[in-house]
Amino acid sequence: MNTLHIGIDLGTTNSAIAAFNGDVLTVIPNSFGENLTPSVVRIDHRSETTAGRRACRYLDSDPANTRHEFKRLMGTDVKLAFAASGVLLLPEELSARVLASLLADAADHLGWTPR
């Protein structure tokens, strides 16, 4: 059984995920085939989360429900509002949604299910 190590760079602007099998390091592309995933989260009126490139598309057209650069606020008690759904989230919670998106991309790319 080979061990696979996953590394994540959670960035303020963009994030990335890579896998290392002991010999080879591979940057894992997102569902758009890109190595970098925008650290952006959108929550719509149904409270559904979109993260990454899909969410980034709404920065200009739906700024009340799309957040970016929230990593700068980590460690504070600032909650960010998503007007359409009435949801308030801490920067750490938004970061977790970006991380979940990265992990889903890795699982799809590598063909495994995270534990």
Image (tube, rainbow, N blue to C red):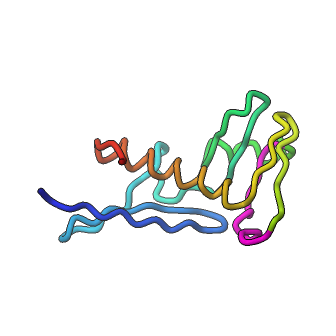
Query: In what quadrant of the picture does the N terminus appear?
Result: bottom left
Q: In which quarter of the image is residue 86?
A: top right
Q: Say whether residue 72 is magenta.
A: yes
- Residue at (88, 40) in percent of width and height: 83
Compared to residue 69, the image places residue 82 above or below, namely: above
Q: Position of residue 85 (x, y in %)?
A: 82, 34
Residue 28, above or below 65:
below
> Where does the magenta region start and end?
65-76
Q: Which residue lies furthest to the top in this view?
A: 46
Q: Which residue is drawn at 36% across and 48% down?
A: 115
Q: In which quarter of the image is residue 5?
A: bottom left
Q: Is residue 26 visible?
A: no
Between 115 and 37, the one nearer to me in the picture: 115
Residue drawn at 83 percent across, 43 percent down: 82
Most distant residue in the left direction: 1
- Name the one closer to the observer, 1 or 36: 1
The reply to whether the magenta stretch includes residue 71 is yes
Position of residue 57 measured from the top left corner of the image (x, y, whole percent): 70, 43
Task: Answer left or right for 16 relative to 79.
Answer: left
Task: Estimate the x, y position of residue 60 in percent, counting from the top left.
Answer: 82, 46
With respect to residue 25, does 101 lie above or below? Answer: above
Residue 49 in sight in this render:
yes
Residue 95's spot in the image, x, y percent? 63, 58
Which residue sits at x=74%, y=62%?
A: 70
Drawn side of residue 88 relative to residue 9, left or right: right
Tell whether 106 sits left or right of 37: left
Count how many numbered circles sit on residues in the image: 0
Q: In which quarter of the image is residue 10?
A: bottom right
